[in-house]
Image (tube, rainbow, N blue to C red):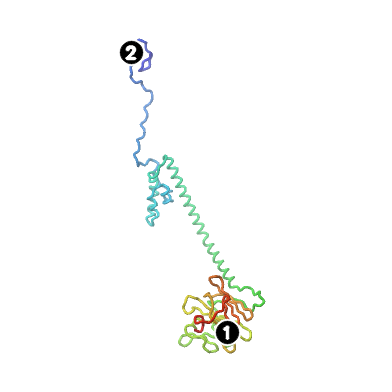
Amino acid sequence: MFCSHCGAQMAPDAAFCSVCGKAAGSTSSPVSLDKPSAPGPAPQAPGDIPDGVKGWSWGAFLLNWIWAIGNRSWIGLLSLVPYLGWIVVFWLGFKGREMAWKNKQWDSLEHFNRVQRKWSQWGIGITLAAIVLAILAAMATPALEDYARRTAGETARQDDTPPPADDAAVTARGLIDSNADNLPASLSTVAGLLDRRTNADGSRSLTLGGRVLFSGEDASWQFPLRSFALSGGREAILMARSGDRGNSCETLFFFLLADASGVKPTPMFGTCAPRGSFVQRDDVIEIQLPDVSGNSTIVLRDGVVIKDGQVVGMTGLNDPSR
């Protein structure tokens, strides 16, 4: 028999324990030899922020509205608002982690910190990549501009060079430019001197051998470009009219067909482009002018102007003398 209190052996008929003095059969609780356990942490109230949540968030600061959507912190979308957005961005950096903890279900504090660390890594990585790209773009821009200028200059030089005269029938080939600086003020023709004059009253006139061909406002815009020798002592004088009576067309052209008896104008023609090229084959003159569809071809043959295969007739709108 053993004492139920201290565990000492007792005589079978003993009424009391000879060691602790307790009565046999006592129901007193045995002495516990274990140390008392420490009190557990007090339960947190809803909305409390545990230690390890607060702090600066690079993910919220750098990715702002993207971070706000991913962490259900919708107030972070105010970072898209002009002017106010800069204030919200810094506020997200300071308070973003706390808002994310409150607005999303997390498995644990470790899970929360792991996700927020990834947001920060992505934010820093994207920002650094953007800075590097901006620096590279700034370094490359001057080189690209210089390349564009050099390419444009080479193209212009190529345009200014007439194609080689490989056609045996070609008697003349070159460029025409109504905006050139060295255009002639007068031109000697088989019918006399073609001359642009300024009258005493300041008006302009175009004369041939002293006789007025064109006068008034139109004469201020008409001037010769070059002459083409034709068979039989004839001549075709290419004329330009800039301004075209005040409308938006920059330049139109026409010919003065001259012989010993005088001159006769052809209808005006063109695409409003001031520059083009010409080829003369005996008495046929072909002019190429750029237009919206590529090029337009004007041919002078036997005193008739043909544009893209269609004869150009004289009307009140294309008569250079009106």
The quarter holding residue 153 reads bottom right
Q: Position of residue 221 (x, y in %)?
A: 50, 81
Residue located 58% across and 71% down the image = 159
Residue toward you, 268 or 193: 268
Q: Residues within 10 Å of mark 2 (few under 14, many from 20)?
A: some
In this rendering, the label closer to the viewer, 2 or 1: 1
Q: Position of residue 130 (x, y in %)?
A: 48, 54
Residue located 54% across and 72% down the image = 291
Which is nearer the N-term, disc 2 or disc 1? 2
Q: Which quadrant of the figure contains the N terminus?
A: top left
Q: Residue furthest top?
A: 13
Identified by mark 1, the residue type is Leu
The quarter holding residue 100 reads top left
Q: Position of residue 53 (x, y in %)?
A: 39, 43
Q: Which residue in the protein does label 2 denote?
A: 16
Residue toward you, 143 or 48: 48
Identified by mark 2, the residue type is Phe
Q: Which residue in the protein does label 1 denote?
A: 257
Q: Is residue 43 above or below residue 286?
A: above
> Gap between marks 2 and 1, in whole Å?
155 Å
Q: Is residue 208 left or right of residue 119?
A: right
